[in-house]
Amino acid sequence: MNGREDKKNNDLFYTCSLIEYIARKTKNSPTVIVNALGKDKISNIYSIADIYHSDNIDRVSDDFISECGIQTGSFDNVAECRYAVPTHWDIGKVYKRLILKISETENTDVITVLIKVFNSGIVSLIEDYNSSFYYDSPDAIYQTFLNDCKPLQ
């Protein structure tokens, strides 16, 4: 471990944040981005995230947008937000924590879990910046995921 957090956890944080960044830049749901990238590209991003992290995120995202032929969509949760917009880093951290918890609990690799999470109903809850869900406790977000993504009362 170098720094405050395990290197692979930081690599997952960057991977999730990059997915969020590409989603915002192309006005697509993160689900669309994960499926456009596919497991192999996501695994590659994760494996060399420390290299990508030292590069300009605009250039890195442009490369993946071009390489995967990601078109501009109509999902714009940033424009719909009536309050302070969380950064792509903020939301990347939410996804990272959830993926790590599920991976640990299910003893499953993080890339498989990442794809599962980004293709679940939890995305619509996390991506709704007009709600308070994305800054709920990691345990509450995890329990919501386990409860078929229905917000806890």
Image (cartoon, helix red, strand yellow):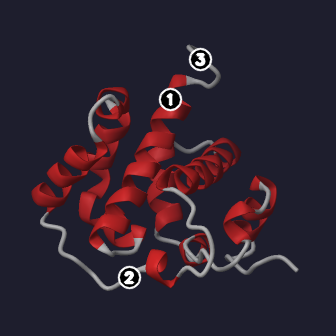
Which residue is painted at 48% across and 40% down in the image?
Answer: 12
Q: Residue 20: image x %, image y %?
A: 42, 59
Question: Can you tell which quarter of the image residue 9 is in?
Answer: top right
Q: Residue 95: image x %, image y %?
A: 57, 55
The alpha-carbon separation of the residues under discs 3 and 1 comes to: 12 Å
Amino acid, disc 2: Phe
**Secondary structure state at the residue bearing disc 2:** loop
Question: Can you tell which quarter of the image residue 55 is in?
Answer: top left
Q: Categorize mark 3 by other alpha carbons within 10 Å: few (<14), some (14-19), many (20+).
A: few
Amino acid, disc 3: Gly
Q: Residue 43: image x %, image y %?
A: 33, 42
- The residue identified by callout 2 is 75
Q: Is 147 on the left or on the right of 109, as rendered?
A: right
Q: Is 150 on the left or on the right of 11, as rendered?
A: right
Which residue is painted at 75% across and 54% down in the image?
Answer: 138
Q: Is 146 on the left or on the right of 29, as rendered?
A: right
The alpha-carbon separation of the residues under discs 2 and 1 comes to: 30 Å
- The residue identified by callout 3 is 3
Which residue is painted at 50% across and 29% down in the image?
Answer: 8
Q: Nearer the viewer, mark 2 or mark 1?
A: 2
Amino acid, disc 1: Lys
Q: Residue 79: image x %, image y %?
A: 45, 80
- The residue identified by callout 1 is 8
Query: Is there CB contact under 8 Å for labels 3 and 1?
Result: no
Q: Categorize mark 1 by other alpha carbons within 10 Å: few (<14), some (14-19), many (20+).
A: some
